[in-house]
Amino acid sequence: MTAAVTIRKARHEDMAALCSLLEMLFSIEEDFAFDVRKQCCGLGLMLEGSGRAVFVAEADGMVVGMCSGQLNVSTAEGAPSVLVEDMAVAVPWQGRGIGRMLMDAVHGWAADNGALRMQLLADRDNGPALGFYSRIGWKRTNLVCLTRRVFSEERI
């Protein structure tokens, strides 16, 4: 696997590969369960909406990684911020700088959209991911993520 890796915006034709990467990611995240229908719906929203971007890493015509970002307004910054989501690189391609390339792409997109800060959530037990984020300059905060369902029944 010495193929050149390119980073580009995701397309609808990438959906199967993106869902496969999400399945891998969600298998190691305690808070999420993979549901191909939900993930395809979410990815479709990400690909079609403004203020959102999905980048893929491609090698030999195959998608081997992905990372997405969504614009938010930060009252703390008085400017846009970006929530980074779904950072995943296929296991055989990890350790080759692809994650950094994907995060750099989202960082550039964030800058182009006037964002002053990026933020992300990571599983507290995912040591390799936390180490990766630390190596590329991310810092832990004192904030705690809380979540609450809007609807108790399935809506999708």
Image: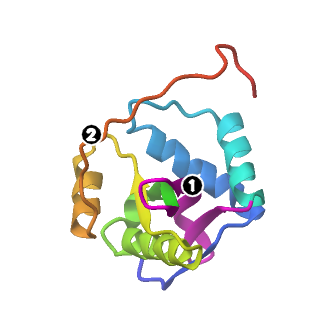
Amino acid type indicated by mark 2: Arg
Is 143 in the magenta?
A: no
Say if 104 sits above or below 142 in the image: below
Please name the residue shown 63% across and 75% down the image.
Answer: 61
* Residue 10 in the image, given as x and y percentages of width and height: 66, 67
Question: Can I make out residue 85 in this image?
Answer: no
Extreme residue in the top direction = 152
Q: Which residues are magenta?
A: 50-79
Magenta stretch, overall SS: strand
Question: Which numbered marker is on residue 124?
Answer: 2
In the foreground, 18 or 115: 115
Quarter of the picture containing the C terminus is: top right
* Residue 85 in the image, given as x and y percentages of width and height: 50, 52
Amino acid type indicated by mark 1: Asn
**Mark 1: few/some/many CA within 10 Å (<14, 14-19, 20+):** some
**Mark 2: few/some/many CA within 10 Å (<14, 14-19, 20+):** few
* Residue 60 in the image, given as x and y percentages of width and height: 57, 78
Question: Mark 1 = which residue?
Answer: 72
Mark 1 or 2, nearer chain start: 1
Indicate left or right for 109 with 116 as reference. Answer: right
Extreme residue in the bottom direction = 4
